[in-house]
Image: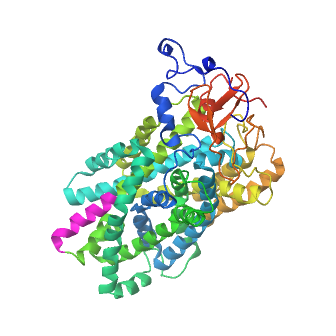
């Protein structure tokens, strides 16, 4: 085996899986607790690099799975809310501005996730935040998943109430608990679910829209002429920016896309075109579908407005009920609308629950150096989401999303700027992303200072602390401050705080001759499991190798490389 000399067989026998008498002896400080935990760390590779041996899916299967979550119905509601308030013209401009920014910032993140097979939290660690500094953004991403789970669950409960007459509180429970069996099995189950349900979802969503436009072309003219409740129909900068701020709350969706893109196969000459197509489509390309759905949401809200009123016009179940009513017998309208809503919400909420469990586990394990298992945080995330649903978050949706977007924008723009500018232009940030404990400083001021400044000032602006005139510009402030301050901080610190060490003690390079992460296997002497090269470092104390999770749970620090 390349690299340092490994220890004798007896020295590796340090876990419950490898020592018969382990039940009566304490486990080493670095070992994940229990054989079940060791098994779960391998399932979907929570907290770690996704190895080549596990990434058996084709680029198109990965892309389809990643895009399956974009079936969510919240886009229709978000677009409708903006359109009814500010008019069609302002809404479409707001949607377009947000989509361009989301695409530009999402591209480098998606590329790094697919190329180096890491989730966004692991990328964030090495892109200016440090090992513990990214805990803050990991919690923000986790909050994104349960906020949107609650939003999507509320929409599903509305559908169940309309179709099955279930009280909303029961609908909230149903929408929460039905995803648990699917999320348990991670990518293996989710890939099948998304591939099988996508054709049905597309047919039910696109069919009624095409029919409505074909049967009554005048609906398009009425849609384009709609002036909104807060304006005269003209283009207004403040209205556009307020609407864009709501849309930009979705900027953190790239994190969920990367949770799937990290399972992309290695890029080769043979699959290069398919690989790039999948990365662009399922990475930043998700926002193209999202923006289209938001625009459709405005259209459908205007279409049904006179019949149901402004409050109900923002509800996707009512929007599609109105669309189906134009083309179907009355007895089929509600069942089809409910089926569409339920399929859509299952497709996105399995992703929300899955990604949220990864984010919470990442944060908890780093702070406590204990690994309780991913399923614990599936339940925690769902608990938060259920509480929000019972608190009727749907009624103040735009307020929540506008506030949240400031934090999400600051985070994503900071990481994207570090990759695009600090790595490739200033060359102060290492090109290869680093995530392992001992290789990174605890906190890197480049990302942390930029993020805190951008989010803090933009939130202050949002709450009118700097005057009413500047309030609509809070998302712009988050973008500009993060984009400017990130390279400035890198120049001020001269890139000193990116890497605590440049050598992980293993002789073999991290990348193979094709530039893909090396698939060479190494055995972790703590948990006795086999991992690929990017997931291990040397353990000087025991003259062996140690995996990244055992490093994360090492409470004594005996396995961590010295400075």
Tell me the magenta residue range: 329-344
Q: Quadrant of the C terminus?
A: top right
Answer with left or right where residue 164 lies relative to residue 561. Answer: left
Image-based side of 289 in relation to 123, left or right: left
Please state the horizontal and vertical placement of residue 514, each as a whole percent of the image.
68, 54
The residue under the point 51% across, 69% down is 288
Q: Position of residue 197 (x, y in %)?
A: 34, 60
> Is residue 301 at least partly visible in the picture?
yes
Name the residue rendered at 48%, 77% in the picture.
Answer: 231
- Residue 276: give x, y in percent of width and height: 59, 64
Res. 151 visible in picture: no
Q: Nearer the viewer, residue 29 or 469?
A: 29
Side (left or right) of 215 relative to 472: left
Q: Is residue 114 above or below residue 439?
A: below
Query: Which residue is found at the position 80% from the left and 52% from the top?
Result: 428
SS majority, magenta: helix
Tally of numbered discs: 0
Q: To which quarter of the image does residue 474 belong? A: bottom right
Quadrant where the N terminus is found in the figure: top right
Location of residue 460 (image quadrant): bottom right
The picture places residue 522, in percent across and down from the top left corner, at 63, 34
Residue 396, above or below 132: below
Residue 176 sits inside the magenta stretch: no
Q: Which residue is at the front of the view, 64 or 514?
A: 514
Residue drawn at 60 percent across, 61 percent down: 106
Query: Which sits in the foreground, 495 or 26?
Result: 26
Q: According to the image, what is the colour scheme of the structure?
A: rainbow
């Amino acid at each position: 085996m390349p690299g340092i000399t490994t220890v004798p067989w007896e020295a590796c026998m340090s876990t419950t899986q490898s020592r018969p008498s382990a039940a009566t002896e304490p486990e080493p400080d670095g070992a994940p607790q229990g054989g079940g935990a060791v098994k779960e760390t391998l399932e979907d590779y929570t907290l770690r690099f996704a190895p080549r041996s596990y990434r058996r899916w084709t680029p198109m299967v990965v892309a389809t799975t990643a895009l399956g979550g974009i079936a969510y119905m919240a886009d229709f509601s978000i677009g409708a809310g903006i359109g009814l308030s500010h008019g069609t013209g302002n809404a479409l401009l707001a949607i377009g501005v947000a989509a361009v920014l989301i695409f530009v910032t999402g591209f480098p993140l998606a590329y790094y996730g697919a190329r180096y097979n890491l989730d966004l939290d692991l990328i964030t660690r090495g892109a200016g935040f440090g090992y513990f500094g990214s805990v803050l953004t990991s919690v923000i991403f986790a909050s994104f998943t349960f906020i949107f789970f609650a939003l999507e669950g509320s929409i599903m409960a509305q559908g169940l109430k309309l179709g099955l007459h279930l009280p909303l509180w029961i609908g909230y429970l149903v929408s929460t608990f039905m995803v648990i069996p699917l999320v348990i099995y991670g990518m293996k189950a989710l890939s099948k679910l998304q591939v099988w349900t996508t054709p049905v979802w597309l047919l039910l969503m696109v069919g009624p829209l095409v029919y409505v436009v074909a049967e009554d072309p005048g609906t398009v003219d009425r849609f384009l002429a709609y002036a909104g409740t807060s304006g005269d129909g003209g283009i207004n900068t403040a209205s556009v920016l307020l609407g864009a701020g709501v849309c930009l709350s979705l900027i953190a969706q790239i994190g969920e896309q990367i949770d799937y893109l990290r399972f992309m196969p290695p890029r080769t000459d043979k699959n290069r075109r398919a690989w790039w197509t999948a990365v662009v489509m399922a990475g930043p390309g998700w926002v193209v579908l999202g923006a289209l759905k938001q625009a459709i949401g405005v259209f459908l809200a205007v279409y049904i407005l006179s019949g149901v009123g402004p409050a109900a016009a923002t509800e996707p179940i009512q929007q599609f009920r109105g669309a189906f009513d134009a083309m179907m017998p009355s007895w089929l309208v509600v069942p089809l609308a409910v089926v569409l809503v339920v399929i859509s919400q299952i497709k996105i909420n399995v992703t929300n629950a899955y990604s949220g469990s990864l984010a919470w586990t990442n944060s908890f394990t780093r702070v406590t150096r204990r690994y309780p298992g991913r399923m614990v945080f599936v339940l925690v995330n769902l608990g938060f989401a259920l509480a929000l649903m019972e608190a009727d978050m749907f009624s103040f949706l735009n307020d929540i999303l506008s506030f949240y977007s400031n934090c999400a924008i600051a985070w994503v723009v900071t990481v994207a700027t570090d990759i695009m500018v600090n790595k490739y232009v200033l060359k102060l940030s290492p090109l290869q992303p680093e995530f392992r404990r001992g290789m990174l400083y605890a906190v890197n001021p480049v990302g942390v200072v930029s993020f805190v400044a951008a989010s803090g000032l933009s939130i202050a602006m949002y709450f009118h602390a700097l005057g009413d005139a500047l309030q609509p510009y809070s998302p712009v402030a988050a973008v500009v401050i993060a984009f400017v301050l990130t390279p400035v901080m890198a120049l001020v610190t001269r890139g000193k705080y990116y890497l605590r060490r440049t050598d992980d003690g293993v002789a073999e390079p991290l990348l193979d001759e094709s530039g893909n992460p090396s698939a060479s296997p190494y055995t972790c002497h703590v948990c006795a499991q086999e991992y690929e090269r990017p997931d291990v470092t040397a353990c000087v104390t025991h003259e062996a190798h140690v995996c990244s999770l055992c490093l994360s749970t090492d409470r004594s620090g005996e396995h961590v490389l010295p400075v």
